[in-house]
Amino acid sequence: MTEEVKVFRAWGSPFSYRVELALRLKGVAYEYIEEDLSNKSTLLLEYNPVHKKVPVLLHHGKPIAESLVILEYIEETWQENPILPKDPHERAVARFWSRFLDDKCSLALWMSCWTEGETQQNFMEQAKECLHLLEEELKGKKFFGGDSIGMVDIAASFIAHWLGVLEEMAGISLLDEEKYPNLCKWTEEFLKSDAVMECLPKRANLLASFQARKQAISATTASV
C-alpha cells in the first residue's frame, strides 16, 4: 500500500525545507501543498490550530506540526538512512544543538539582517556568539552528524543557504571565512549533496523576495 505523506509548506521557508530534506534523505516520496501565509488555508488551520504555521506533515491523515518535532517523527517512522545516532548520549547532544539553533541562533541571525543601528549591533553580537559555538562544535567533523548529514545539519540548513542571501540583502557580513573556517567548509560540503540541492529555493529568487520585502517595509516606514 502506498503511504500517504503530505507536507504543507511555504516557498522559501527554511523550516519547511527541513522536513522536505529529511524525507528526501530517507527516500520517502511525498506530496507538497503550497501555502500562502497571507491567506492560510482551512486545512492548515485545522491541522495546526495552535501555531497556525508551516510546516505540517500529514501521514495517513494524521498531522504533525513544528519542524524539529516532525524530524523526530520522520526518524522514528522510517528507519533507513538515520539522521540521529544510535547512542543515547549522542542523540541527546544532537537534540541539544538542534534546539540551540532554533532557540538562540535563528532569531539572532534573522534579526541581524532586518534591524538597524544599535538594535542591529546587539543582534549581530548575539549571532556571532552563536556562530562561534557552532564553529567549535564542528571541529574535526565533516558534518555536525559526523560523516553524513544528520538532524543538526538539517536544522542548520538556514545558515548554509539563507544566511548568505540575507547578508547580501542587508549589506552586512556575519559568516566570515577567516573567523569561521569550519562552518564555511561545512556549508560547502552540505551544498554538495544532491538531496540538499533538489528542493532548495533558488538563491536569486530568495534574494528578490527579501529585497521586495525590505522595500515594502521601508515604504511603510517612510509613510508613517
Image: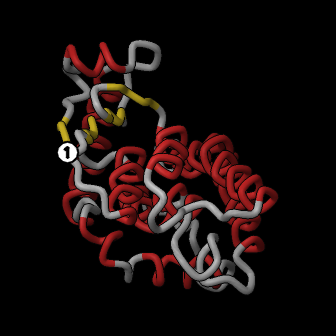
Residue drawn at point x = 28 percent, y = 62 percent = 200
Q: Describe residue 45's horizontal placement relative to residue 171 as left or right.
A: left
Quick one: which residue is furthest to the right in this view? 89
Q: Quadrant of the C terminus?
A: top left
Q: Where is residue 207 in the image (x, y as percent from the top left)?
A: 27, 58
Instruction: Please tell me which residue is depicted at 30% across the width and 77% down the height of the picture.
Output: 194
Residue 87 x/y as whole percent: 75, 63
Residue 174's quadrant in the figure?
bottom right
Amino acid marked by disc 1 = Met
Q: In which quarter of the image is the N terminus?
A: top left
Left or right: where 164 falls relative to 83:
left
How many other residues sit within 10 Å of disc 1, few (<14), some (14-19) or many (≥20)?
A: few
Between 73 and 148, the one lying in front of the other is 73
Task: From the viewer's side, name the closer residue of 91 and 183.
Answer: 91
Q: Name the residue under label 1.
A: 1
Disc 1 secondary structure class: loop
